[in-house]
Image (cartoon, rainbow, N blue to C red):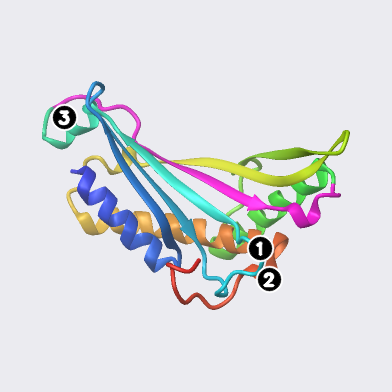
Amino acid sequence: MITYDDLAAALEDAWLVAGLHDHDVVESVNPEALERTYRAELFPEHPEPMPEHATPPWVEVALTWTAAHQLRSDGHSIAPGVLELQWTYSVDVRSEIERTDYELLRAFQGAVRVALRRVAPETVPPAEYVAIEVRRGYRHSGDRMVPAYVQLIGANRTDLSDLWDVRSNDAVRDALREELLVVAALVHTLGEAFAPATLGNYRAVDTA
């Protein structure tokens, strides 16, 4: 049976195995709703110190542990609802600010397909594996607005509901490791597509 603590520990083990490193982990409790949330920002290996204005693509993983999840974890025979991990990929593409949204979206989708072929070459990747949006920010320069930043934001979800009745922690860890290998491959192909100079030999989390 999955518990919150086992799931959080298995996630941390999985992202280290996949070569990702946490820069921020936040756990919070909502006592009124009896919910716990977990969020971690995960970065790939990259050179230290970071070049100015260069940030590698990164992913945030988040989950919400509800009162129903806790009751099921405690052994009560209830339907706890879906247990999901939410993944949010962020790519700073200010160096390609002149490219159209369409061009940026196609490049992101191409990186996703490359990543999926690397980790599962025998599987046909789904057309919409990651939902993507382009975010553009502007600032005042004199009497006109000029571009300040461009970000690509991608999101998808992993349903862990099939693991509720798994009695082995090793099985849960193995499933999460497989998922994080896909995530790490995707982060790296995004780096290759948009920010190749930001990927390299990782040394210290504290200076990133």
Q: Which residue is drawn at 50% across and 56% down?
A: 183
Residue 42 lies in the magenta stretch: no
Marks 1 & 2, CB-CB < 8 Å contact = yes
Residue beneath disc 1: 54
Q: Distance between the residues labelled 3 and 2?
A: 47 Å
Outermost residue toward the right in this view = 143
Q: Distance between the residues labelled 3 and 1?
A: 45 Å
Question: What is the span of residues highlighted in magenta in the rendered image?
Answer: 77-99
Q: Is residue 121 visible?
A: no
| Mark 1 or 2, closer to the camera | 1
Q: Position of residue 39 (x, y in %)?
A: 39, 45
Q: Which residue is drawn at 19% across and 54% down?
A: 168
Q: Position of residue 47 (x, y in %)?
A: 57, 75
Q: Which residue is drawn at 69% across and 63% down?
A: 195
Q: Which residue is drawn at 14% across and 27% down?
A: 77
Residue beneath disc 3: 71
Outermost residue toward the left in this view = 75
Task: Count the numbered circles shown.
Answer: 3
Crowd rating for badge 3 (residues with CA inside 10 Å; few <14, some 14–19, many 20+)? some
Residue type highlighted by circle 2: Ala
| Mark 3 or 2, closer to the camera | 2
Left or right of residue 207, residue 35 in this image:
left
The image quadrant of residue 206 is bottom left
Q: Which secondary structure, mark 2?
A: helix
Q: Nearer the viewer, residue 145 or 64?
A: 145
Residue beneath disc 2: 197
Q: Position of residue 153 (x, y in %)?
A: 62, 43
